[in-house]
Amino acid sequence: MAHNIYHNLVIRASKEAIFNAFTQPEHLNNWWTLTASREPKLEAEYNLNFTEQYDWYAKVLEVEQNEAFYLKITKADDDWNPTTFGFQLTTIEKGTLVAFSHTGWKDANHHFKHTSFCWALLLNALKNYLEKGTVIPFKARE
């Protein structure tokens, strides 16, 4: 049985701004990664670098410009292999609904639960980045 993480949040920003913030390295580095590389094209492989120990890779599994984006982990911690994460975007009256998921976890262990908590914090950082322009230096992120 696979275990899944789901988070929904509303961001007062356009679908295009959210899509870019989640897919473009110059934006990813402002709220999630230390350094990232690649572009949102089907089958492209992203490098998601956090530290020398956490230098991960993921392949673009699905991409619909300004609508949806999913990455399948190809090299990371054992618990993250081979999970898939990403989002669907829907325009609503107050902004954009981000339906985030991180699916395919083998176990609902400590790492799964910790990652769910971390995604909540990170998605809030994404929201603050887009709504307020807040950039938290990488070393200050928890």
Image (spheres, rainbow, N blue to C red):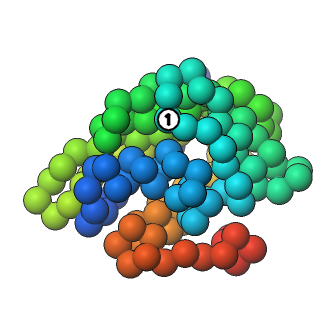
Q: How many marks?
A: 1
Q: Quadrant of residue 51?
A: bottom right
Query: Residue visible at 88% across and 52% down?
Result: 52
Query: Residue visible at 47% across and 39% down?
Result: 86
List the residue tagged with mark 1: 40
Query: Residue visible at 62% across and 60% down?
Result: 29
| Residue 126, above or below 98 | below
Q: Amino acid at mark 1?
A: Pro
Q: Secondary structure at mark 1?
A: loop
Quarter of the image where the C terminus is located: bottom right
Quarter of the image where the N terminus is located: top right
On the rendered structure, is 93 left or right of 55? left
On the rendered structure, is 80 left or right of 66? right
Q: Judge by depth and name the residue closer to the eye, 129 or 85.
A: 129
Q: Quadrant of residue 57?
A: top right
On the rendered structure, is 69 left or right of 58? left
In this view, the residue farthest toward the left is: 93
Q: Judge by depth and name the residue closer to the eye, 112 or 101.
A: 101
Percent position (x, y) of residue 141? Answer: 67, 72
Crowd tier of the residue under label 1, counting other residues whose Cα lies within 10 Å: few below 14, some 14–19, many 20 or above: many
Residue 110 can be seen, yes or no? no
| Residue 140, above or below 56 | below
Query: Residue visible at 45% across and 70% down?
Result: 129
Percent position (x, y) of residue 111? Answer: 72, 48
Percent position (x, y) of residue 115? Answer: 63, 52
Q: Judge by depth and name the residue closer to the eye, 53 or 26.
A: 26
Residue 77 can be seen, yes or no? yes
Percent position (x, y) of residue 132? Answer: 38, 78
